[in-house]
Image (cartoon, grey):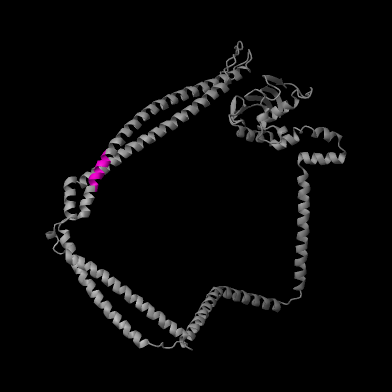
Amino acid sequence: MRPIRLELEGFTAFREYTVLDFEGAELFVLTGPTGSGKSSIIDAITFALYGSVPRYQNPNLVYPVISQGKVEARVRFDFAIADRVYTAVRVVRKTARGGATTKEARLETDGRLIAGSADDISRKMRELIGLNFEQFTTCVVLPQGDFARFLHEKPAQRQDLLTKLLGIDIYEKMGNLARSRESVAKQKAQLHQEELEQFRSATKAAKKEAASKVEALEKLKAAIETTEPELERLDKEVEAKQAEAIRLEAEAELLKSLRIPRGLTELAGTIEEARTDDDRARKARGEADDALRRSETARAKLGDPAGLNEMLRAHEDHKERSHELEAARRDADSAQSRLQEHESSHAESEARLAKARATVDTARRKLAAHDLATHLEAGKPCPVCQRVLAEVPALTLPPALSKAEKDLERVEKARKKADRSFRDAEKKATLAHERVRSLASELEAIERHLSKASEPAAIQTELLEIENPRPRSLPRAKPAALGKTMRRALTKKSSACRTKRRARGNASRKRATESPS
């Protein structure tokens, strides 16, 4: 790789546009006081090729190369590999968050673009030069400070430093690993040789017998592995049966200790008496239920109060839903108006965005034209149209691309905000119309339900007649009341019987526990 020309602007010490021409220089030296930019030239060449700066010890750190007060740094490097000339251009630009981006980059040769992104250029350089960034900064660009130390070191230490810089200590590590593996392999071979010596005196018959035993053992192992799960299952089943047997034996011992309690005959008579009382109570309850059903049948002829109350509630729901529908329609009209306003603002922001993008594209084309014009020479053909130029056109510095891009960024933010407002208004309008449709559907269902219903006043009059009937309207009201009374009596009698049974059962168990075994 042979350098030809280097252009810098806004790169560390080179704030203004600077050109370094290496054409025809076979051997050169960069001299000057500290801080004059010697190392920056090497950094600019490395950055143009690989997109990183070696002095920062971090390949991703490029923000510091931008000159103080500048928003971007530009580097263009023309170099030759064999007989072909290449041009690498990279731009570092500050971001709103305080970092930097290097997305703008390109690599050209013979007027053709062969790489159009930062990563593509780095990959292409590894193919062209044959070195990655670490190898290039170790073998081609010796890090600052290491060269002076390399010259003053003793021969042995100089060899160690050279080994470190070139990374050839890997061969020493490979040798150590190979020798370690060789030692382990020799130990294994010696162990296997000793084992072979033990069987060297064995006869063919002994070998055959040993092979038969191995085959038999393999079959036995397979049989054991096949039956082992079944044996485990049977062991678990045996354990469960043994536990069950122990529990049953304990219960049998308890049963042997049981004795017939005293007063069992009297208890049987009491139980029989309670059953008779329970039967009488059940019969009385049945008669009460019949009387209650007759009374409810007579009352049902007056009408269903539940159905009337439901119709009355339906009338109230109809009135409430009508008011809600009117309010929802007003809200929907208001939301639709706001949607139209936001739609107009959204269209205006889209137009401004298209205009800002066109401005950025124009600025980029003018900048590219200006960059091309700096290389034109009178009497030589134009690299674009191949027409011989009589004279070089006057160069006019194009407008700053960064300002157009900042305007574009501002317009994009405004467009996103308008888009969010439009989507929010659209969502609200959709929800409002959906609520109108839902309420209209509910109101239509209520109207169908009330199509054959009476007016609310008539329903309330009918409910008053049901709640306060005339005496002749309930001829069977007395049996109904009698049924309720008999139900309460039956419940009370059944509860008393259950209490008596529990008391007798507790007494019997207590006596059985206190009796001797």
Which residue does the image show at 48% across and 83% down from the upper left? 251
Q: Is residue 445 above or below residue 187?
A: above
In the rendering, at what x and y percent does residue 209 appear? 67, 78
Classify residue 208 by image quadrant.
bottom right
Residue furthest out toward the left: 472
Can residue 83 be seen here? Answer: no
Question: Is 144 or 504 nearer to us in this picture?
Answer: 504
The residue depicted at 76 percent of the width and 49 percent of the height is: 174
Asked if the magenta segment contains residue 314, the reply would be yes
Q: Main secondary structure of the magenta part?
A: helix
Q: Position of residue 330 (x, y in %)?
A: 31, 33
Question: How far across and how far down the image is residue 33, in percent?
Answer: 79, 22
Choose top left, top right, bottom left or bottom right for residue 131: top right
**Residue, far right:** 154
Q: Nearer the viewer, residue 507 or 162?
A: 507
- Residue 398 sits above or below residue 62 on the image: above
Range of residues picked out in magenta: 313-322
Q: Is residue 69 left or right of residue 188?
A: left
Q: Quadrant of the N terminus?
A: top right
Q: Is residue 165 left or right of residue 67?
A: right
The reply, left or right, for residue 213 in relation to residue 438 is right
- Is the residue 186 above or below the residue 400 in the image? below
Q: Is residue 114 magenta?
A: no
- Can I make out residue 211 in this image? yes
Q: Of 313 and 48, which appears nearest the observer?
A: 313
Q: Position of residue 112 (x, y in %)?
A: 59, 26
**Residue at 86% over, 34% down:** 152
Q: How many marks?
A: 0
Q: Residue 50 versus residue 344: which sits nearer the camera?
A: 344
